[in-house]
Image (tube, helix red, strand yellow):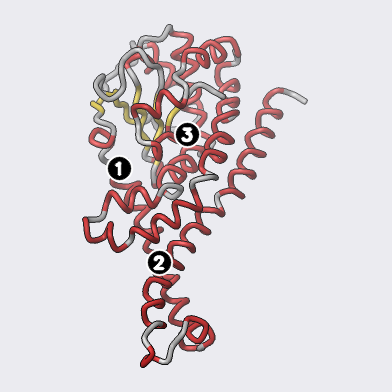
Amino acid sequence: MSLPENIARIQWNNRLKSGALCLLFIVAMAVFALTLFLMIAAPASFVPESGLSIPQMLAEPKMQLRILRFFTKVFFFAAAATLYFIYRDINNIDRLFSAQPLQLRSSDSFYRALENMCIARGLKTPALYIFSPVIFPPPHVSAAVVQGVGGKSALILTQGALNLEPPLQQALAAQVVQRLYTKDTYFLTLLCFLGHFPFHVSRATNVIGRIVFWLPLKAADFVLRPFRPLILNLRLQRLDAGALDLTKDAAPLAALAERLAPLPVVEHYIYTPYLSLFITKPA
């Protein structure tokens, strides 16, 4: 079997596995909705005058329709909130990561490699940013790739990534372009927001909202917490193998892997929900 075919098979198998694990996002939202329902229904069932109990509510046809409508509204709320968070954060990358716009020209080796590979794949070159040295210390080598609806994408680099030797910069550019080309960034952005929607909802609501939704968000997070590392590891372990298709040389990619910051190092500086966006040292 030739190398490109083997790479494609590995990536396709990983997509199937992680796609199956993504069903847990739906399960978590169902748990969120169910907990909200129980918070509303349970007090009514303890009022003797109401003549209602939770089993009676579930057996009542009209109540079943109301419960279905309630669950549908919660799903729409979660989906709309996720799209809003993605749209808001992609349009505010500088504030989200305390990053500054990065102005590079075609004379720069990294930008030249990135631009050429994007052209070869028929992609738009992502908007470039650089992490503040206060947020992400310069010695560490890493990058975050974000992609939203409509193909708008952004790449946030550490100063350490810009200080790499040209062959390693080309290897990093290949990993970035491969994520964009295979649409893996869409999945990883969804993992960032949908897989951590309790975190984003909690941050976006006011004090009253955090109190009201505390129990449903905790219940949803309890379901998602054990599986998020599995999805993350599955996607990161072999995700960038397809970059070999662009560089045609494994040596720079292997050398880059040794220079990249490991995931625990990135987690020290970045909120956990955003780790899926980062290119880090493979496990």
Q: Position of residue 80 (x, y in %)?
A: 36, 59
Quadrant into which the C terminus falls: top right
Q: Secondary structure at mark 1?
A: helix
Q: Are marks 1 and 2 in contact (CB under 8 Å)?
A: no
The Cα–Cα distance between marks 1 and 3, rounded to whole angstroms, is 18 Å
The Cα–Cα distance between marks 3 and 2, rounded to whole angstroms, is 31 Å
Could you tell me which residue is drawn at 46 percent across and 17 percent down?
A: 260
Q: Position of residue 96 (x, y in %)?
A: 27, 37
Of circles 3 and 2, the one toward us is 2
> In the rendered image of this protein, does residue 253 appear above or below residue 127?
above
Q: Position of residue 224 (x, y in %)?
A: 49, 49
* Closer-to-camera residue (14/250): 14
The Cα–Cα distance between marks 1 and 2, rounded to whole angstroms, is 22 Å
Considering only order in the chain, which callout, 3 or 1, is on the residue closer to the N terminus? 1
**Residue type, numbered disc 1:** Asp
Residue 125 located left or right of residue 167 = left
Read off the residue under disc 2.
74
**Residue 180's disc number:** 3
Read off the residue under disc 1.
89
> In the rendered image of this protein, does residue 195 appear above or below residue 244?
below
As drawn, the residue found furthest toward the top would be 165
* Closer-to-camera residue (72/9): 72
Q: Quadrant of residue 276?
A: top left
Q: Secondary structure at mark 2?
A: helix
Residue 154 located left or right of residue 57 = left
Q: Secondary structure at mark 3?
A: helix
Q: How packed is label 3: few (under 14 Cα within 10 Å), some, or many (20 or more)?
A: many
Quadrant into which the N terminus falls: top right
**Residue type, numbered disc 2:** Val
Considering only order in the chain, which callout, 2 or 1, is on the residue closer to the N terminus? 2
Q: Position of residue 238 (x, y in %)?
A: 60, 28
Could you tell me which residue is drawn at 47 percent across and 52 percent down?
A: 222
